[in-house]
Image (cartoon, rainbow, N blue to C red):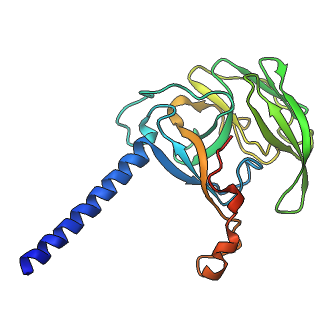
């Protein structure tokens, strides 16, 4: 009996090790979970959303690996993002903080914001009014549907067209770099802020946001299990990120 129990314990340990290895492989090469801690991507993504990011969409760099070891440079086995992708990347100014924004500028593009309107290569991007959005603080924002040059449509929010980042100088996106902006245009630190985010090197891309697997409105704490089910945003579960 002792030998049988020992074998059973050993089998359990091996099963746990295999499970951990499989989870690490999936997280490194396939899908990695992320959560949304800020409102810079509203209304597309809300604080308390949890989503999966596909690691294989853009290939792999050292930032695809746990702890980002400097084993190689550049990217392998993949192409770049398309305009309109919601992408997760390492913040270029520290190479450690995870950011999620929408890719609006590709290598070689000239990007400029004029009176709140995104301009790409000298052409204003079309936006159509789409009602309003009330923020958590009670501020009513104007919602627009923006249509990028490749036909991708997505919502954005504007407090006004005269905020700090609503009028910028032109940005020329360097080779192997991308330009990203938050959908909540007046509440987003993004590529418009060169001293904080700036252009995103292709190497810093982690993956493309694919779909939500969980969402909570934050009204239930970990020590309040009787509130957990009421805090879930059921209408956001398993929604694609667009």
Looking at the image, residue 204 lies above or below residue 219: above
In which quarter of the view is residue 17 placed? bottom left
Q: Residue at x 65, y 57 (%)?
A: 37
- For the point 22% across and 62% down, which residue is it? 14
Please identify the quadrant where the N terminus is shown. bottom left
Residue 211, x across and y down, in percent: 60, 47
Q: Across the whole image, how many numbered discs are drawn on residues?
A: 0
Residue appearing at x 70%, y 73% in the figure: 230
As drawn, 106 above or below 26: above
Residue 186 image-quadrant placement = top right
142 left or right of 29 in image: right
Residue drawn at (84%, 58%), measured in percent from left and top?
135
Dividing the picture into quadrants, the one containing residue 120 is top right
- The C terminus appears in which quarter of the rendering? top right
Residue 57 visible within the image? yes
User: Where's residue 71, x and y in %?
Assistant: 34, 36
In screen coordinates, is 114 left or right of 154?
right
| Residue 24 position within the rendered picture, expressed as x and y whole percent measured from the top left | 37, 51
- Asked whether residue 66 appears in the rendered view, the answer is no
Q: Position of residue 166 (x, y in %)?
A: 86, 36
């Amino acid at each position: 009996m002792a030998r049988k129990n020992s074998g059973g314990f050993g089998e359990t340990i091996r099963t746990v090790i295999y499970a951990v290895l499989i989870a690490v492989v999936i997280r490194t090469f396939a899908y990695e979970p992320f959560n949304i801690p800020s409102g810079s991507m509203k209304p597309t993504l809300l604080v308390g959303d949890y989503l999966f990011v596909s690691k294989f969409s853009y290939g792999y760099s050292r930032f695809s690996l746990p702890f980002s070891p400097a084993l190689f440079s550049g990217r392998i086995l993949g192409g770049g993002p398309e305009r309109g992708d919601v992408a997760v990347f390492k913040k270029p100014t520290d190479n450690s903080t995870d950011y999620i924004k929408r890719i609006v500028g590709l290598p070689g593009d000239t990007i400029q914001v004029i009176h709140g309107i995104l301009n790409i290569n000298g052409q204003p991007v079309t936006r159509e009014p789409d009602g309003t959005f009330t923020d958590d603080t009670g501020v009513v924002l104007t919602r627009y549907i923006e249509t990028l040059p490749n036909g991708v449509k997505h919502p954005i929010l504007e407090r006004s067209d005269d905020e700090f980042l609503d009028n910028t100088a032109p940005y020329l996106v360097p080779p192997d770099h991308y330009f990203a902006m938050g959908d909540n245009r007046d509440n987003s630190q993004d590529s418009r802020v060169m001293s904080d985010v700036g252009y995103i090197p292709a190497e810093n891309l982690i993956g493309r946001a694919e779909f939500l697997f969980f969402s909570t409105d934050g009204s239930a704490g970990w020590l309040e299990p009787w509130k957990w089910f009421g805090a879930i945003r059921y209408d956001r579960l398993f929604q694609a990120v667009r």
